Amino acid sequence: MTQSYNTILVAVDGSMGAELALHKAIHVAKRNHARLVITHVIDTRALHNVAAFDASVYESLEREATELLKGYQEEALAAGLSDVQVLIEFGNPKTLLAHDIPKQSGADLMLLGATGLNAFERLLIGSSSEYILRHATIDLLIVREEQKTI
């Protein structure tokens, strides 16, 4: 039995890993004749103290995210997809991507770029991809950057 997907969710943050995940998501969506949902989560956990002094921080981050997603949406449409939606959320990326956003979007496959954190950073703050991998209720594909050989 061949598995097909109806709604592909890809999480992006502007990093190279996220762009690789986007490109792969576009190809998977084309092969499956699926809807593509491109999402970005603005991590508010680190902003609470800053935002108390300057509410424009949230507006600035949302404006940047909107521009980023607009460019990605245009790229997906130019690649031949007809149903491409964008979604910006505020909160904890780990929990939103593992639980809320897949349910809200109706996604049945999520693509994520592999994290670029080193072992010490993962120990301190944890890997978002690892958390989502353990808690997601839909299929998940972690996209890794190509390793250059010497």
Image (spheres, grey):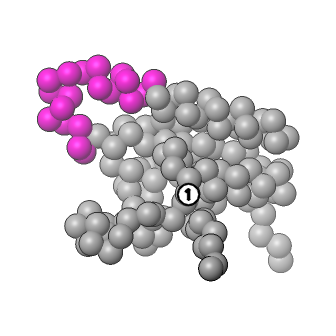
List the residue tagged with mark 1.
17
Quarter placement of the N terminus:
bottom right
- Asked whether residue 131 is in view, the answer is no
Q: Position of residue 91 (x, y in %)?
A: 33, 42
Verify whether residue 53 appears in magenta.
yes
Taking the magenta stretch, the answer to whether it contains residue 72 is no
The residue lying at 62 percent from left, 56 percent from top is 21
Quadrant location of residue 143?
bottom right
Q: Main secondary structure of the magenta part?
A: helix
The magenta-colored residue range is 45-63
Q: Which residue is located at x 26 percent, y 63 percent? A: 125
Residue most toward the front?
A: 150
Q: Position of residue 51 (x, y in %)?
A: 20, 28
Quarter of the image containing the C terminus? bottom right
Q: Is residue 79 above or below residue 133?
A: above
Task: Say if 12 sits above or below 145 in the image.
Answer: above
| Other-residue count near label 1 (Cα within 10 Å), few / some / many at <14 / 14–19 / ≥20 | many
Measured along the vertical axis of the image, is residue 50 above or below residue 21? above
Q: Position of residue 35 (x, y in %)?
A: 73, 45
Instruction: Look at the numbered disc 1 and give the secondary structure of its residue.
Output: helix
